[in-house]
Image (spheres, rainbow, N blue to C red):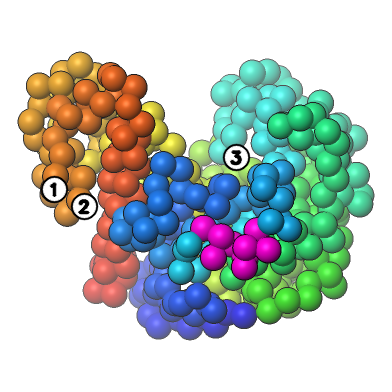
Amino acid sequence: MIKFKIVKKSKKSGARIGILKTPHGEIETPTLVPVATQAVVKTLTSEEAEAAKCQILIANTFHLHLKPGEKIVKSAGGIHKFMNWRHPLMTDSGGFQVFSLGFGHDLGVGKISAPSFGKNKDAIIDKNAQPKKVKITSGGVYFKSPIDGRELFIGPRESIKIQEAIGADIIFAFDECTPPLSTKSYIETSLRRTHDWAKICIASHKTNQALFGIVQGSKFKDLRGESARIINSLGFDGFGIGGDLGESKADTKKIISWVLPHLEESKPRHLLGIGKIEDIENIVKSGIDLFDCTVPTHYGRRGIAFVSSGLPAVALAKAGKLNLNKSVFLKDKKPLDSKCACSVCQNYKRSYIAHLLKAGEITAMRLLTFHNLHFFNTYVEKVREKIKNGLI
């Protein structure tokens, strides 16, 4: 079980400092929760993830169910021993895959996506719509395995059973992560399912793992409020805010503001799937304690480093990012970021990492992933210091 204590509240915003105690140690919030989909932060060892200042990781229930299977993880002594991670861990519920393998795949949209970004900008998901490769029912969801095509079923009971076998400190209730481009009638139908599944998850939960409920409701203020009130009433140990989060960062901020007043203040709040560097301070000021995001690792594997300053103009796709795939860096003898204390910046130059990328060496991905995680975690440390010092 977990214990959560709020140690400081901002007088300028909704930001707060908390201590979250788990069976595998305590963390200071707000914090980034890096993604360890298959019980690994891609390209890094668990020791390297720790050295990059990661306090807590989140693994993926759906993918661990596919391989190696929760029975193998359990037989290894649980996920902490399996991956040699001595700090807190979360697992998601599989609800995101309802979206990512369903309507998200069909329409080419993400959790924050204007309609014009999709493959079909005129697509509207109405009340009885079904995605092409996923079947959503009142009892749960039928998937096709992306590995061998076999049919898989996950509902609330199955999700809880899988997560209990995996053994993370914090688990999530099974839900439907709703897609953008949905009508209100679709969201209403989905919300009833998610609330029914939340109740089944509570009833099915047998271990001492903390169980978080997930608030849905898309971009509709009344539905977000309704969902927050219902999820809050069920006795969960903490809360996730999930689903599609509007068509802009401003929409996301509004949605958070609709939800948090209805949630018990003393429990931790997790924003699911959001955490770009430019988002972090805003979501923290809104009152979010935890947030998971693939950006630092995803970008690192594609040759992109996040840096603080001193970038040559030719290298900039966007301020704060360094694209080491560009040939200009083959002659650049500076560290990735002169202000960064990570071991990559202390020991390697841009020219070497650019060479590794050109040569197709996987070490480049490892070095950039490590740096990016260290950079993000250091940034969040600074945000916490701002709260402590009354600056935000």
Q: Nearer the viewer, mark 1 or mark 3?
A: 1
Cβ atoms under marks 2 and 1 closer than 8 Å: yes
Q: Taking 308 as reference, is 374 left or right?
A: right
Residue occupying the point 68% across, 63% down? 75
Q: CA distance from mark 1 to mark 3?
A: 36 Å
Q: CA distance from mark 2 to mark 1?
A: 6 Å
Part of the protein shown in magenta: 73-83
Q: Which residue does the numbered mark 2 point to in the structure image?
A: 342
Q: Are marks 2 and 3 in contact (CB under 8 Å)?
A: no
Q: Which mark is residue 91?
A: none
Q: Secondary structure at mark 3?
A: loop
Residue 37 higher or lower than 232, as above or below: above
Residue 244 visible, this orientation: yes
Q: Is residue 82 magenta?
A: yes
Residue at (26%, 26%) from the top-left corner?
356
Q: Give the mark nearest the N terminus, 2 or 3.
A: 3
Residue 255, image x and y in percent?
A: 59, 53
Q: Can you give x and y, in whole percent of width and height, for residue 44 in the image?
A: 39, 47
- Describe the element under mark 1 as helix, strand or loop: helix
Within-10-Å neighbours for mark 1: few <14, some 14–19, many 20+ = some
Q: Earlier in the sequence, mark 1 or mark 3?
A: 3
Q: Nearer the viewer, residue 156 or 65?
A: 65
Number of marks present in the image shown: 3
Disc 2/disc 3 C-alpha distance (Å): 31 Å
Can you identify the residue that label 1 sits on? Answer: 346
Who is closer to the viewer here, 379 or 364? Answer: 364
Give the foreground label among 2 and 3. 2
Which residue does the numbered mark 3 point to in the structure image? 111
